[in-house]
Image (tube, grey):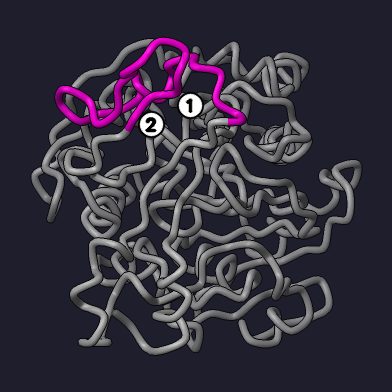
């Protein structure tokens, strides 16, 4: 059985104890040697405060660093390649830089990248990794519990994408233009980097319009595992989302990254072992705002002529848009799929060119872009699939 630790953590003031308990439950102390060079990989998506739930909280990051230090590990560094902005600026804004400095954890060199071949990859045969990533003996993935417009949720597996250098992330969205293909690329990345440990900050999660523009939602949990697919499967179950509707779970399991079958996962808590269903019953949040529909897969033949109308797409809320142009610059499509057409007006989408990668939505600093679904999708969601 694959183990995922789940520990209640009602407040970030309890993070040290909760993280230590979770890691002890899965025997994490045996995974590391004091002389190893270890990278802590938090989620540093964008410049935001800790209470926005956009990034890994500094208290969880610090708790992991303290745990490793207590094992005698001294060569610790942290890094991420944000979608927008510099690593240090983002880390400073959310408090991770200060936490790292106080604990003697240095900032790794994520300032540029180089191509690293991965001939074993089923979908991606190479990655442009941030400079120092290949030099580490071990990676500890300190991810955040959030929704995601492309993959439904973003957790352990998706967080590794931050090891790919800057502008190349946009190119990856063009090369792997849908949720399934993108998940295949992430599976190869996870198999290439093979993080040794995954810890998820689910004390305060992000629901709704994630991964940057959603709303904080208290979940009160710390999750930990050596298996990123199993961890993300438990995450999906806790927000009452069928784990098999999450492309990274299905593809990750198929490619051998980890386990998605809930019957093969045991949830280890301080009070004993639970099944995934029992963990959902005890710790789950049925009204968590995440897309649970099946309309994008489709089996209702009568609705096939309306496929174009039912397709989800990013849309700009004109009341929130400040015309900053971040979305225009973030679009990875050659020539761009959105442009300023009139002075003083928000950008306009060319949906014929849009690949639905949601880079624009993910990077919008004003939360002005959301995932639009035609009301007809509600009908489709009531029935099987489209």
Q: CA distance from mark 1 to mark 2?
A: 6 Å
User: Is tag 1's residue or tag 2's residue first in the polypeptide sequence?
Assistant: 1
Placement of 97 over or under 254, stated as above or below: above
Q: How many marks?
A: 2
Q: Nearer the viewer, residue 75 or 85?
A: 85
Tell me if I can see residue 372 in this picture.
yes
Indicate the position of residue 50 as horizontal and vertical percent values.
Answer: 74, 31
Residue corresponding to mark 2: 163
What secondary structure is found at the residue carrying circle 1? loop
Q: Specify start and end residues of the magenta stretch as a single range.
A: 319-348
Check residue 297 in the rendering and tell me which mark sits there, or answer none: none
Residue at 50% in and 44% down: 370
Indicate the position of residue 384 as horizontal and vertical percent values.
Answer: 37, 88
Residue at 21% in and 55% down: 181
Residue 143 among those drawn in magenta: no
Quadrant in which the C terminus is drawn: bottom left
Placement of 351 over or under 372, stated as above or below: above
What secondary structure is found at the residue carrying circle 2? helix
Check residue 80 in the rendering and tell me which mark sits there, or answer none: 1
Q: Main secondary structure of the magenta part?
A: loop
Tell me if I can see residue 81 in this picture.
no
- Residue contact at pointers 1 and 2, CB within 8 angstroms: yes
**Horizontally, is 184 left or right of 52 in the view?**
left
């Amino acid at each position: 059985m694959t183990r995922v630790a789940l520990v209640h953590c009602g407040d970030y003031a309890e993070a040290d104890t909760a993280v230590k308990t979770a890691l002890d439950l899965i025997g994490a102390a045996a995974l590391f040697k004091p002389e190893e060079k270890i990278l802590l990989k938090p989620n540093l998506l964008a410049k935001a405060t800790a209470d926005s739930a956009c990034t890994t909280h500094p208290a969880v990051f610090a708790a992991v660093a303290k745990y490793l230090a207590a094992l005698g590990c001294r060569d610790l560094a942290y890094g991420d390649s944000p979608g927008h902005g510099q690593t240090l600026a983002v880390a400073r804004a959310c408090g991770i830089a200060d936490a790292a400095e106080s604990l003697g954890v240095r900032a790794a060199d994520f300032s540029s990248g180089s191509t690293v071949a991965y001939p074993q990859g089923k979908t991606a045969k190479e990655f442009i990794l941030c400079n120092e990533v290949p030099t580490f003996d071990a990676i500890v993935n300190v991810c955040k519990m959030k929704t995601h417009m492309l993959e439904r949720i973003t957790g352990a597996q998706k967080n590794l994408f931050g090891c790919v250098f800057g502008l190349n992330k946009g190119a990856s969205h063009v090369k792997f233009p849908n949720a399934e293909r993108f998940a295949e690329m992430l599976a190869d990345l996870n198999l290439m980097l093979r993080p040794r440990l995954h810890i998820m900050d689910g004390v305060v999660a992000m629901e709704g319009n994630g991964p940057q523009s959603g709303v904080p939602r208290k979940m009160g949990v710390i999750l930990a595992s050596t298996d990123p697919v199993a961890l993300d499967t438990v995450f999906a179950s806790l927000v009452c989302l069928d784990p098999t509707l999450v492309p990274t779970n299905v593809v990750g399991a198929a490619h051998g990254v980890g386990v998605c079958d809930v019957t093969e996962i045991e949830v280890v808590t301080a009070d004993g072992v639970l099944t995934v269903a029992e963990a959902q019953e005890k710790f789950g949040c049925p009204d968590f705002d995440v897309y649970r529909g099946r309309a994008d897969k489709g089996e209702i033949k009568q609705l096939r002529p309306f496929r174009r109308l039912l397709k989800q797409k990013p849309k700009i809320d004109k009341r929130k848009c400040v015309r900053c142009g971040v979305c225009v610059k973030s679009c990875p499509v050659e020539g761009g799929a959105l442009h300023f057409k009139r002075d003083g007006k928000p950008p306009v989408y060319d949906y014929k060119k849009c690949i639905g990668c949601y880079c624009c939505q993910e990077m919008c600093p004003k939360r002005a872009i959301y995932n639009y679904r035609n009301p007809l999708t509600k009908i489709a969601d009531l029935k099987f699939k489209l």
